[in-house]
Amino acid sequence: MAMVTRYSIQDEVGRFLTIDGFFSYDDADAVEFRDEDEAYEELAAYPGCTVETYQRLSDFPDFTATPSIEKEAA
């Protein structure tokens, strides 16, 4: 298990944006963004809201680094 960073959009009263485009107090319904820029692009459609950063456990860590040639040869 690894910690991964995710982003969500919240309105001014703390509700989370859901996949349906509505807001819910249940964080389990929240849309998770893996990319901060993508979250900010979506935020443009929801004035008065904010992008919140959080970390959670995941079975699959994010691999953002380019693999080295040495690892590919192994």
Image (cartoon, rainbow, N blue to C red):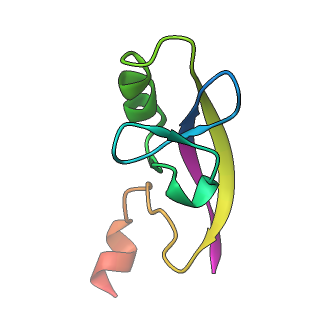
Where in the figure is residue 72, as x and y percent of width and height? Answer: 30, 77
Q: Is residue 50 left or right of residue 41?
A: right
**What quarter of the picture does the C terminus occupy?**
bottom left
- Quarter-wise, where is residue 21 in the image? top left
| Total numbered circles | 0
Q: Is residue 3 left or right of residue 45?
A: right
Where in the figure is residue 47, as x and y percent of width and height? Answer: 48, 11
Residue at the image point whose x is 36% and y is 23% from the top: 41
Where in the figure is residue 25, as x and y percent of width and height? Answer: 64, 46
**What quarter of the picture does the N terminus occupy?**
bottom right
Residue at the image point whose x is 68% and y is 48% from the top: 54
Outermost residue toward the top?
47
Where in the figure is residue 44, as x and y percent of width and height? Answer: 39, 15
The answer to which of 2 and 8 lies nearer the viewer is 8
The magenta stretch is: 1-7
Outermost residue toward the bottom?
74
Q: Please, is residue 22 above or below residue 73 in the view?
A: above
Does the magenta stretch mainly form a helix, a strand or a loop?
Answer: strand
